[in-house]
């Protein structure tokens, strides 16, 4: 069992005062709403106790005396009581659900805001499906607590207390007869809680696994279909879905068993009341109206108890969900802006790595004592085998991760001493796998930067020749690209990424295998655009195809996390080292033809 899955299974306490105090803080902005709901509950609970008492009065005082006028009055009061109970119940339900929805909105916004602040390493450790469960299913569980638990539980308690008081007023002996079945009721409730707790744990685990599995498979559907894994993935999903079905069926079984048992215990109490109360009516120590009221009260007595048992389940769910949500919210971002910033913006764009050592996992360094410098406006290329550490250098420059040893300087200032947003706004990264958001073409170039005008968007697109295919789209720059740019080709998405980088006018430009997915014709189109894009900017170019880096001012050759060679294309070929061997492998066919 993995640690991630185990986290979904752990439920914790049924009630945790620390968590509850923290949850109640979310009600504070809606104190007036909560007080109004409590008043509705108080009034509704008071009215719900009256009908059986009115029945007693009607029977003992007016029916036996054949007093039609008095009976009409009682009937009218009974009707008004029912209407009042309905009105207060409606008000309570409406107010609590409105408050619950607003709290859900606030909580989801807080979680999403926090997720945006967390470092990339956190998302390396936590699957997306699990985080989605926090924002959806776990927040829904808390909504149930606020709408059906934390405040409305007072209604059940008040109703139960009112009924107990009235029963003792009517006849304490009959009241004790009703209470004699409470031990049996307690036993049934305890067994139910234990069983439901286990089934609920299984449901939560299954939901988290379904979310994670679906996210992975929908995101990787091209791989699934490309390797004809549909049947295998279908079988795996069948197993996961079956776990969810079995857990829910188990839960349904316990609920289906528990509530009829409650009804049976309640019926047993009514039978005791009818038998023992009937004897008292025969003896003249109890009126018929009081006996009828007792029967009605005994039925109403078990309803709040049943509701409280259900609210225990809601509380159990909410405590588990809140513990997971607060664990997420309490996870501090490990990469934050410096409190003593030495620079507001990146002015020139110089870069220096000083003896940088970094590892994703302790004891497994990815970079070893890496040192190099990139002067403002200089184009430096990084080449090397897969896993040599090229992309890691870019991640460290943008502070997606922080180095364990050494320093990274931008304009002579440690990247840790910059405002995080200011640093990242100065760096534009164009990746091999371009990520496009749902929205229009213009939105994906602008990326929410209101300072980039429509004219600048179009100018950037025209410079990198993206304008040519955009003009052929149905509504041009207002065309929806679909989720992850599904309506565009790989080459078109790469062109949009270039337009995006140019529109944001960064001081530092990073091309991470940015032309590897572009066909030869498209590459020719953007070659001159790249010259314009790179002009006057500090640029780092990562590429496997050596043809794209031959014009770089300098080329850094990485091998197993170390810089092994530095020089221009021609200088490195003369060394006949790692770069020369890479060149021979890529161009061996052309070399053979030339010979």
Image (tube, rainbow, N blue to C red):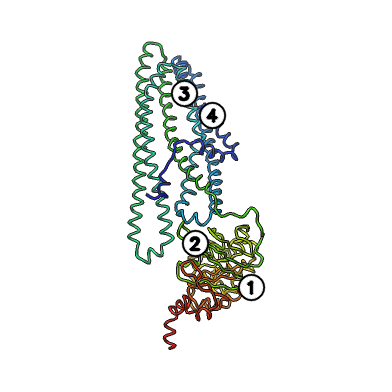
The residue identified by callout 4 is: 42
Say which quadrant the C terminus sits in. Answer: bottom left
Q: Nearer the viewer, mark 2 or mark 3?
A: 2
Mark 3 or mark 4, which is nearer the start of the sequence?
Answer: 4
State the image coordinates of residue 359 (x, y, percent, origin top left): 48, 60
Disc 1 designates what residue? 536
Q: Considering only order in the chain, which callout, 1 or 2, is on the residue closer to the N terminus?
A: 2
At 40% from the left and 19% from the top, the residue drawn is 176
The image shows residue 138 at horizontal and vertical percentages of 47, 45
Query: Residue at 42% of width from left, 87% of height from top?
Result: 593
Q: Nearer the viewer, residue 282 or 99?
A: 99
349 over 192 or under it: above or below = below
Of residues 299 and 531, which is closer to you in this image? 531
Secondary structure at numbered mark 2? helix
- Spatial separation of the CA atoms under disc 2 and disc 1: 34 Å
Mark 3 = which residue? 163
Within 10 Å of disc 2 (Cα), the crowding (few <14, some 14-19, many 20+) is few
Residue corresponding to mark 2: 483
């Amino acid at each position: 069992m993995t640690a991630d899955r185990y986290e979904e299974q752990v439920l914790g306490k049924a009630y945790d005062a620390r968590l509850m105090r923290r949850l109640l803080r979310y009600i504070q902005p809606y104190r007036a709403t909560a007080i109004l709901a409590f008043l509705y509950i108080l009034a509704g609970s008071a009215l719900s106790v009256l009908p059986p008492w009115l029945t007693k009065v009607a029977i003992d005082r007016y029916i036996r005396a054949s007093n039609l006028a008095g009976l009409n009055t009682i009937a009218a009061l009974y009707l008004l009581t029912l209407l009042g109970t309905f009105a207060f119940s409606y008000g309570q339900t409406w107010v609590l659900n409105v408050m619950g929805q607003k709290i859900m909105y606030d909580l989801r916004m807080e979680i999403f805001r926090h997720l945006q602040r967390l470092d990339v390493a956190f998302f390396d450790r936590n699957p997306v499906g699990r985080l989605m469960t926090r924002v959806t299913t776990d927040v829904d569980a808390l909504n149930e607590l606020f709408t059906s638990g934390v405040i409305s539980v007072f209604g059940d308690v008040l109703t139960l207390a009112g009924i107990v008081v009235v029963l003792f007023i009517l006849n304490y002996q009959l009241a004790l007869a009703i209470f004699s079945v409470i031990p049996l009721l307690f036993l049934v409730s305890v067994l139910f809680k234990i069983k439901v707790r286990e089934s609920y744990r299984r449901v939560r685990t299954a939901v988290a696994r379904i979310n994670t599995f679906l996210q992975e498979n929908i995101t990787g559907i091209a791989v699934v279909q490309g390797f004809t894994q549909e049947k295998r993935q279908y079988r795996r999903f069948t197993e996961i879905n079956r776990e969810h079905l079995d857990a829910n069926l188990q839960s349904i079984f316990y609920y289906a068993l528990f509530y009829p048992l409650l009804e049976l215990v309640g019926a047993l109490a009514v039978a005791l009341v009818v038998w023992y109360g009937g004897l008292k009516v025969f003896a003249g120590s109890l009126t018929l109206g009081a006996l009828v009221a007792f029967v009605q009260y005994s039925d109403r007595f078990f309803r709040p108890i049943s509701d409280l048992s259900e609210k225990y389940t809601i509380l159990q769910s909410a405590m588990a969900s809140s513990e997971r949500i607060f664990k997420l919210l309490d996870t501090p971002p490990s990469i934050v802006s410096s409190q003593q910033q030495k620079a507001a913006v990146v002015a020139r764009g110089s870069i220096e790595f000083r003896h940088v050592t970094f590892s994703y996992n302790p004891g497994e360094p990815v970079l070893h004592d890496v040192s190099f410098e990139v002067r403002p406006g200089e184009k430096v290329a990084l080449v090397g085998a897969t896993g040599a550490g090229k992309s890691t250098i870019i991640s460290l420059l943008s502070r997606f991760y922080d180095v364990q040893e050494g320093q990274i300087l931008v304009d002579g200032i440690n990247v840790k001493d910059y405002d995080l947003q200011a640093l990242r706004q100065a760096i534009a990264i164009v990746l091999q796998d371009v990520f496009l958001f749902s929205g229009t073409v213009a939105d994906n170039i602008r990326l929410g930067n209101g300072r980039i005008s429509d004219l600048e968007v179009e100018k950037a697109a025209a410079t990198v020749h993206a304008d040519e295919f955009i003009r052929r789209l149905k509504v041009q720059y207002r065309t929806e690209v679909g989720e992850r740019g599904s309506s565009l080709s790989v080459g078109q998405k790469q062109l949009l990424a270039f337009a995006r980088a140019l529109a944001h006018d960064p001081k530092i430009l990073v091309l991470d295998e940015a032309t590897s997915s572009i066909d030869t014709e498209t590459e020719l189109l953007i070659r001159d655009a790249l010259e314009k894009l790179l002009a006057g900017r500090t640029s780092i170019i990562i590429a496997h195809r050596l043809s794209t880096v031959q014009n770089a001012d300098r080329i850094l050759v990485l091998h197993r996390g170390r810089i092994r060679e530095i020089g221009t294309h021609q200088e490195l070929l003369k060394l006949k080292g790692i770069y020369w061997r890479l060149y021979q492998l890529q161009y061996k066919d052309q070399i053979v033809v030339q010979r």
